[in-house]
Amino acid sequence: MGTQPIKFTDFGLPPIGGCPLNACLQVLFHSPSFISYMVSSDHKLKCIASDNCVLCLVLKIWEHVNRNMYCGNLNSELCKLLGCTAESDVFYVMSSIVSEMHYAFQRIEPSYELSPIFDSFGGIIEIQNLCQCHGIQEPTEELSIGAKVFINANENLQQAIDELYSSKNVLCETCGSEKQILKKVLQLPDIFLISPIRPELEHYVVPSTVNLGPGKKYEVIGSIINGTTANVKTYSGTFVQLQDKRKRGVSWHKVQNVDAQNSCQVLVYQSVCEGPLKFREVRTPKKMKCSTPIGSARSTTTAWNVTPIVQPAPPVTSGRRLQPKRLDYGVPLAPHQSSSASEKMSPAKSNCGASPRTPSQRSRKIKYVRLRSVVSYEFCCKDPKKFKHFTGLSIYNFKVLYNLLGGDQEIRRLKVKGYAGRTPKRFSVEGKLSSKDKLLMFLWRLRRGMPLRDLAYIFGVGLTTCCQVVYAMLRYLCLTFQGLEKDMFISAQDQKKKPKPFKPFPNLRAIIDGFEIFIQTPSNFQQQGNTYSDYKAHNTIRFLVGISCHGGILFVSPGYEGSMSEKQALKESGFMDFLEPGDVIMSDRGFAINNDLLRIGVDVLKPPSLDGRPKFTPEEEILTRAIASARIYVEHAVRLIKVNRLLQGIIPLKLLPTISDYVYVAGYLANFGYKTFQGSKNRNKKC
């Protein structure tokens, strides 16, 4: 791609109530490295969660303002997605945008260790502790974005940066002895974000350039003042001031001088390139390596010791905190944040002449913060129709089920059984997933058949944790419903007031039917023969379902091999243990269970057969129609079970150990929210 001047965008953004998000976006939209990525990005073509993706929203906003188009409420949606308010810290909002976009890229391209977003804004620091008591610790590498710089009364910004980027001796938090923290910058960003802190200064001068290490020069390209106003540098070298939709020119003298009325929260510096800034093609990073783009400010010939780049703590705003970031900011304290005893110690020598190690020569130990969930119960409740689409339950019925399980008090006590001989442990995501999120995750798995890896991504947890949560909720639901089996198997006396199709059968207690689910063909020949169904001509698992006269599912059997007859499956299922003398059971002709049920005083009602006769008698025709109009509802119950995506298609063999539990839970969940009898016009309508 040929070079061309970078096109800057000065079109305004709709106001969002004094939130610093607009100012942060304007600064990003005037950063050359960031513009280069947006021009060449194909992220929107690959992303499947565009409505909840920060990077997709930022790209949409940039496309609108770049074409001088009104972006509607896109920035308001981004503000809600990030959880920022008018009281939010500007530097934290800026860092959140960058880290969220970094995560969005890695969600689509998980094989890449870093991303073009981090390539522009991020740095990598190697940290090693030398303690007199504990000795030399193994070095670790930290990802970071920007820095908070503490400016003393007798310092300017450059001096404060030099003080921040210098090695220090501190006191060990464990033993109290002297500890030396060696820090080495392995990668410098193209765009350097600075948050100046000046408690003792009412006025200071913003330098046009700053230096980070030997030969690494940065030039100011923008600043955010008073939280909502952005001063940005255009291609011609002049500055403009942008506040929502308002735009006006501003002199460098006004940008440079910062006082109490002109409070500066964030400064943005760009690495100085040779010649004027030109558009360049953004290269895709090589897998598992950190490529160096043109104009990068990374250290390639020398390495220098620094103190850590510290991520600021998020502010508390009206009882709500900003959402956590994607990258790890868990580095030690900066010099101005250390204890008073530590500040009195003399700084350690900086070995600036040490040669750096290449990425292939060093073993990366990069730490990442846990992923933030894309969906949650609170987020899904905003759209009741989508909530029911993904879970099969209305919001009201979800709450009923949640309370039936015991609520948060019981669900958070669930434990995961480890290997043999180990004590079961609780989940390690108590602060990440709420109890309602755990139930929501299981319902997504059952209703939509979503793979566990996809569930782990959208709920922001690891794959192992997702498997543990889904399995624990499955077993807990099974145990809960099993405790209600006797109460749900309603007696014939309690079904005296029957719907119209069942009134001809006064002592009818249950209608029973069977269905089969296809499974993957086993490799074992004996299992192939045992699971092969002659009726379906496929390997299957057989289940039995019983409903009451009101259409509710009151019995679901365990799964049996497809070659087993319905008569044998009924005997082993335990269905007859619920029956009492004088009950009547309705079934299909295929259930040869008359003799077994007659022994316990239970009658069986089946459609009559011809037995070689040319036609039915008039009485038999009436009975056949009455039985058919009643048996149709057990087929509706089977459909409500098989409508769950997880039970459709061919079930893989790895799911066989839990398939009986899934069918059992799906059967009893079908009783939530369905009105089987509403008259002839609205029959079987979902509520």
Image (cartoon, grey):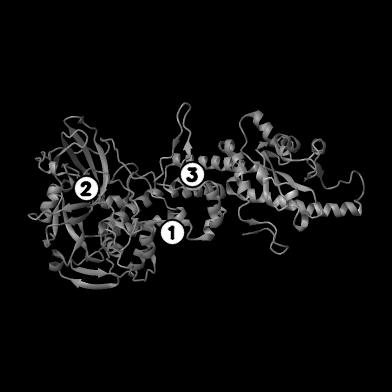
Task: From the image, tell me which residue sits under label 2.
Answer: 309
Q: Quadrant of residue 657?
A: top right
Question: Between tags 2 and 1, which lies in front?
Answer: 2
Task: From the image, tell me which residue sits under label 3.
Answer: 411
Q: Are marks 2 and 1 in contact (CB under 8 Å)?
A: no
Question: As rendered, which of 570 and 195 lies closer to the eye?
Answer: 570
Q: Residue at x 62, y 50 (%)?
A: 670
Disc 2 on helix, strand or loop?
loop
Question: As rendered, which of 103 and 150 lies closer to the eye?
Answer: 150
Q: How many marks?
A: 3
Going by the numbered disc 1, the residue's amino acid type is Asp
- Mark with earlier residue (2, 1): 1
Task: From the image, tell me which residue sits under label 1.
Answer: 51
Going by the numbered disc 3, the residue's amino acid type is Ile
Disc 1 on helix, strand or loop?
helix
Q: Left of 13 or right of it: where is 223?
A: left
- Mark with earlier residue (3, 1): 1
Q: Left of 64 or right of it: where is 4?
A: left
Circle 3: is it few (<14), some (14-19), or many (20+) Cα within 10 Å? Answer: some
Q: Residue 68: x and y, percent?
A: 33, 71
Q: Residue at x 11, y 39 (%)?
A: 348
What's the distance in space between the residues labelled 2 and 3, CA to CA? 40 Å
